[in-house]
């Protein structure tokens, strides 16, 4: 695996590969890699000549500075995982490489209602920061295929919107299934911050979503959401939200006509760690 830290060297390499007709797959990460990230690498390798990954903990997407400071850093382990998965190229830029002129204060992406609901509501500014770094990475890599995990369901929809806004329509967005631990907990870098007792409790967020899926009625969904929230609270999780939304638009719905594809989404605190998960219901 070739490791690049400088954007110019990285772009020179990629340009040469593209001139040779190589197809590029890209898996952006913030490190602290797990099997879910590995599955994205494996998906890319099936579709592309060269798989590129990046590790960059992006400061602009953390609305809580303490969350940024506590984000797990496991670089040596990450590199080993990427090499074992067959990733050919790793880009590990500094903040100055990504934001050479500093973080622009006047840049605003028109994300519409996606920025006002769910994660957008509870983490103001988060998706602007996500768009800022992904826009820069897409400009640098110019991949044929981009691979993201479904665990970050709303973020996947935001990136789809970003691709439209920035004119990168030649890039195909591939959304891959959520990887779970044997007890159902969605794999996440944040799981590393859970203590032993919290780790035992954490799968309650998946069980609450599964409860919605298994009891999906026709008609009013409010009581189903309320019962799922109670399950979180009973397991000592502090919910920000549990919502049932249209799977294509993410607009929350209160009544279901049985023909509409739905997704349930949840976010909750377990101690100091904020966990998110989702489940397509039908």
Image (tube, rainbow, N blue to C red):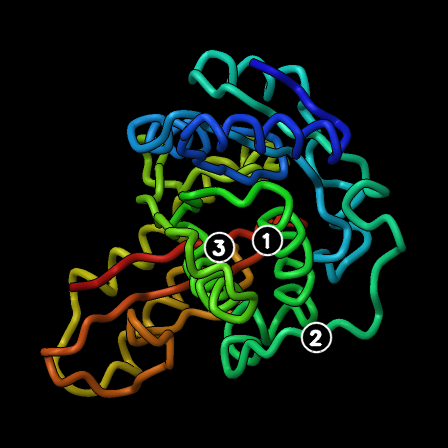
Q: At which x and y percent is residue 46?
A: 29, 28
Q: Which mark is residue 10?
A: none
Direction from residue 224 to residue 187 in the image, left or right: right
User: Does 93 sit above or below residue 243?
Assistant: above
Direction from residue 153 to residue 102 in the image, left or right: right
Direction from residue 147 to residue 58 in the image, left or right: right
Assign a secondary structure to mark 1: strand
| Quarter occupied by the N terminus | top right
Assign a secondary structure to mark 3: strand
Direction from residue 107 to residue 170 in the image, left or right: left
Q: Which mark is residue 108?
A: 2
Q: Earlier in the sequence, mark 2 or mark 3?
A: 2
User: Does 224 sit above or below residue 158?
Assistant: below
Assign a secondary structure to mark 2: loop
Count of numbered circles on the image: 3
Label 3 belongs to which residue?
276
Residue 144 visible in the picture? yes
Residue displayed at 68% across by 72% down: 124
Does the CB distance between marks 1 and 3 fall below 8 Å? yes
Label 1 belongs to which residue?
274
User: Does 200 sit above or below residue 108?
Assistant: above
């Amino acid at each position: 695996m070739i490791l690049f830290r400088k954007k110019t060297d990285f772009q020179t390499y990629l340009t040469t590969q593209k001139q040779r007709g190589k197809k590029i797959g890209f898996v952006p990460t913030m490190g602290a890699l797990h099997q879910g990230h590995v599955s994205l690498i494996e998906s890319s390798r099936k579709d592309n000549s060269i798989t590129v990954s990046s590790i960059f903990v992006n400061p602009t997407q953390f609305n809580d500075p303490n969350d940024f400071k506590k984000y797990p850093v496991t670089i040596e382990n990450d590199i080993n995982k990427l090499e074992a998965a067959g990733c050919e190229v790793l880009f590990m830029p500094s903040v100055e490489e990504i934001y050479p002129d500093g973080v622009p204060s006047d840049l605003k992406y028109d994300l519409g209602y996606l920025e006002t609901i769910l994660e957008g509501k509870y983490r103001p500014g988060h998706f602007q920061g996500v768009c800022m770094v992904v826009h820069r990475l897409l400009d640098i890599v110019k991949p044929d295929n981009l691979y993201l995990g479904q665990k970050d369901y709303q973020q996947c929809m935001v990136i789809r919107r970003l691709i439209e806004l920035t004119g990168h329509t030649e890039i195909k967005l591939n959304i891959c299934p959520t990887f779970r631990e044997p007890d159902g907990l969605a794999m996440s870098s944040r799981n590393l911050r859970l203590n032993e007792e919290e780790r035992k409790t954490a799968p309650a967020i998946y069980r609450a979503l599964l409860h919605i899926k298994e009891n999906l009625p026709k008609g009013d969904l409010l009581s189903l959401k309320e019962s799922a929230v109670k399950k979180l609270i009973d397991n000592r999780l502090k919910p920000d939200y549990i919502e049932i939304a249209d799977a294509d638009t993410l607009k929350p719905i209160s009544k279901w006509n049985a023909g509409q594809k739905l997704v349930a989404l949840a976010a909750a605190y377990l101690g100091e760690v904020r966990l998110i998960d989702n489940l397509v219901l039908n």
